[in-house]
Amino acid sequence: MSGFDLMRDKLTNARIAWRAAQDLEDGSYVNLGIGFPEMIARFQPEGREVTYHTENGVLGFGKAPAPGEEDWDLINAGKKAITLNPGAAIFHHADSFAMVRGGHLDLAVLGAYQVAQNGDLANWRVGSSGVPAVGGAMDLVHGARRVAVVTDHVTRDGGPKLVERCTFPLTGVACVTRVYTSLAVIDIADGRFVLREKLPDITMAALQAVTGATLHIEGEVGDLFVPEEI
Amino acid sequence: MKKVSSSVADAVGVVPDGAQIMIGGFGGSGAPVELIHALIDRFRATGSPKDITIISNNAGNGGVGIAAMIKAGLVRKIICSFPRSPNAEAFNEKYLAGEIELQLVPQGTLAERIRAAGAGIPAFYTPAGFGTELAEGKPTETFDGKTYVRERWLKADVALIKGHKGDHAGNLTYRLAARNFNPLMAMAADTTIAQVAELGEFGSIDPENVVTPGIFVDMIVEVPAPEQEEVLLRKEVIY
């Protein structure tokens, strides 16, 4: 058996999204950040009812309309055309963020540049140059019962994205509760990374080597399993 | 009570130089395109209004709406949450050249600051931004073990609103997700100007279906079959 090759064997974004989707709870209200996190909805397990929230004032939106069928007054926070599911509701921006900060969402999922072991998240800019844009990220990280991150475990250069302390500008302090990466599922508890699952073929030592802070183990570490067809 | 304006040009005539203007919409959804373009027309013809501060979620995209306003040179400053768009060249060029000022506000904080202004609440506390560079220098306070940032209300001289149906009382409804910031901004400005696709008599909107009560609206103008900003962008229209 050949050894684990990080760049070859890590999970694709679709496979990370599939794993995150397995934790969607029946009857939950969920906000998926624009871009990568939106992919999670594609893998929502059958038989579970999930109501999706988008910051610009829609609860209960469904799939994208067929090309040519778009109504551009009906979009999500990523400015993509959406459709409404039966039972959907439309409201203004202050009510939308009341749902966010008021603790009414069960789950918010965001992308990340860096996540620190105490749950700090950096995901809105990497430096001080260019045009900054924050959108709703700083609000979304507060209020949801669970704030999860989906991310590659490492940067393009192979450096760690899970770190002791974020070096990029923060989006929120001590806000992330779980991280789904291309190598592992990690909870954040009491200011520490607690490893819950890892790809079966990567050794603990190899996983720790690409993680910028100590991975703690409490009880059994499960296999991070994603079906081949994803 | 006469709130009805005969044209968008007539309506935007009240906007003074240096005004702080709220503009409804989220991306192209709910953007009052005709009112914005009427402001640009006035500026091109008379050089006024100039030195405008825009409060809106975005900083324009492509060559219409807010982007066209920036390009035309009316805008001194933008207060928004997300100036990044696929075709934000108008804003980007001026920003990177130091010709336009940007105040970045988290989106929910922007909405609540506007709502607070309309509701007569000068400040409030929010968890958003705590510990980040966007909260630097702002007062904080800890409630029940969690720390919050104090944010001030955000008012405007004028709000430009896109409604769907309106009536002579100034009552408004909105179409789909084009609601977004519009009802909040309508509450927060000294003068609120609404364009609507259908303007009816008193009583034409069922009172139970009114989203923005007419007390928040000062001027209303009918723009039948209004342009949709995203549709204009996709046709690459340059205003």
Image: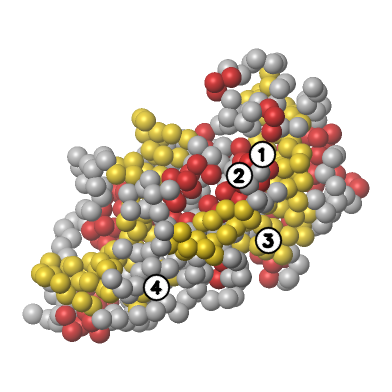
The residue that appears at 34% across and 44% down in the rendered structure is A29
Q: CA distance from mark 2 to mark 1?
A: 7 Å
Give, as a three-letter code, the residue at label 4: Gln
Question: Mark 4 — on which chain does it sit?
Answer: A
Q: Which residue is most to the right?
A: B46
The disc, 2 or 1, on the residue closer to the chain's N-terminal end is 2
Question: Mark 3 — on which chain does it sit?
Answer: B
The residue that appears at 37% across and 53% down in the rendered structure is A144
Q: CA distance from mark 4 to mark 3?
A: 28 Å
Give, as a three-letter code, the residue at label 3: Phe
10 Å crowding of disc 4: few (<14), some (14-19), many (20+): many
Rendered location of residue B172, percent (x, y): 63, 28
Disc number lying in front (4 or 1): 1
Closer-to-camera residue (B134/B151) = B151
Rendered location of residue B216, percent (x, y): 69, 33
Give the residue pinned by disc 4.
A114
Q: Tell me, yes or no, whether the two marked residues, 2 and 1, touch with CB atoms within 8 Å.
A: yes
Q: Mark on residue B91?
A: 3
Give the residue pinned by disc 1.
B187
Give, as a three-letter code, the residue at label 1: Met
The residue that appears at 68% across and 22% down in the rendered structure is B167
